[in-house]
Image (cartoon, rainbow, N blue to C red):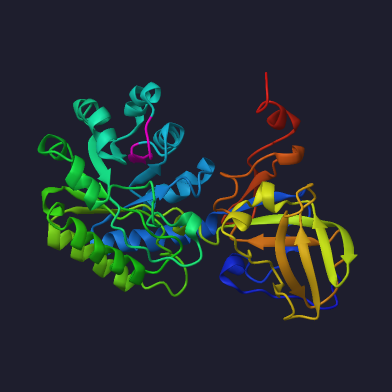
Amino acid sequence: MEQTEMIRDNRPAFEALAGKQPEELFGTLPTPCYLIDEGQLKKNGEILAAVAKHTGCRILLAQKAFSNYDCYPVLAPFLSGTEASGLYEARLGAERMPGREVHVFCAAYREDEFEELLRYADHIVLNSPYQLKQFGKRAKAAGKSLGLRINPECSTQEGHAIYDPCAPGSRLGTTREQWDAEMTDELTVLLDGLHFHTLCEQDADALAVTLQAAKEKFGDILPKMKWLNMGGGHHITRPGYDIGKLEQCVKYAADTWKVEVYLEPGEACALNAGYLAARVLDLVKNGEIRTAILDASAACHMPDVIEMPYLPPLYGAEDRDIHAYSYRLAGPTCLAGDVIGDYSFPRKLQRGDLLLFGDMAIYTTCKNNTFNGMPLPDIWRRRADGTLEKLTAFGYADFRNRLGK
């Protein structure tokens, strides 16, 4: 961009830049690339640790959202451990955050993986009474703490059906009807805890509603348990989040049912702690739509933008038509829908401009792909002192080796 007008962006996604310009900070890096900000990770960790201290709950990193293990040492002092969605994440948590708890939930475990999983996980949450019957005794014999995921059938989300575990017909969690039909005393005695996960980027008021639903559906079961895991989706580190209400919910559950409470946020651990830097390759116009084609792809490098969908924050830009110059930002792949979104800028874009997307530490590096042979962006670490360290060196071999020998 022309430098006649210096843009300052103090939104939470860019607060860690302290008013400095993306080109000044990251202009020498090859794009596209991810950047993980350790200073912001630490701030998030401190907020989470304060919740744990005030309530006695235990907080886990949900690796499905953030699994850049080089940065685990930053978060580890503030957390009780990690949460995994299967064997590989469980192993990663055990190896990269050693000495901490490893919890795992999977909608259905594989027989050929379960013995190895027992080597890494401390807490194993099963999804159905059948899975509890299949694996429960073996896990208990190995000294593991067992839980069953419940479905309180209480949806608090709007517009994000793909991420709503309580949507009608959901495969996730055991409903009370299923419990009454399939659970026996022999199965129930295997359980140490219950688990629910119903939220997605939500405030504590949604948790309060869910907790009441869990009480109504499973209030007679909870006093028999040692722990209750309230899952993730809690936007705890977002400015304005009602931490006081969250702490009330945690204390209520602990006091009412005499259980140890777990929270397993993923997004909150790395919220606003990362960026995706990209450059404008070309500018094209079709009718009234001006499109900037970037070297970064929504489909490949920020898939949640399409799946959610949502408009990621972009340094110095706002929603379409707020500023004088509006552009559709899109990726270079052949997918017609490889569109990041429509933005407006206070001045015209130029080929070669550096653009910086915010809040890109979550659901990016752990979900990206090589569709169209797109290279995986390298990952850089921004230390608290502002220095940059390259963590990866992806290339052609990473694309090729996924497809054959």
As drawn, 388 above or below 54: above
Please name whichever residue, 110 or 353, is drawn nearer the observer in this view of the structure.
Answer: 110
Q: Position of residue 135 (x, y in %)?
A: 27, 29
Q: Which residues are magenta?
A: 99-109
Which of the pair 194/337 is nearer the observer? 337
Side of 198 where 134 appears, left or right: left
Residue 374 visible: no
| Residue 335, above or below 212 | above
Q: Residue at x 55, y 62 (%)?
A: 272
The answer to which of 233 and 242 lies nearer the viewer is: 233
Left or right: 396 as drawn, with respect to 357: right
Q: In the displayed structure, does residue 377 sit left or right of residue 201?
A: right
* Closer-to-camera residue (70/158): 158
Picture mark count = 0
Is residue 355 visible to the viewer in this orientation of the structure? yes
For this orientation, the residue located farthest to the top is 405
Image quadrant containing the N terminus: bottom right
**Is residue 104 magenta-colored?**
yes
Residue 379 image point, x, y percent: 65, 45
Location of residue 262 in the rendering, given as x and y in whole percent from the top left corner: 28, 52
Q: Residue at x 45, y 35 (%)?
A: 92
Residue at 89 percent of width and 62 percent of height: 284
Q: Position of residue 207 (x, y in %)?
A: 32, 65
Q: Is residue 42 left or right of residue 338?
A: left
Question: Dividing the image into 4 quarters, which one contains the C terminus?
Answer: top right
- Residue 236: quadrant of the picture: bottom left
In the rendered image, residue 119 lying in the magenta stretch gets the answer no
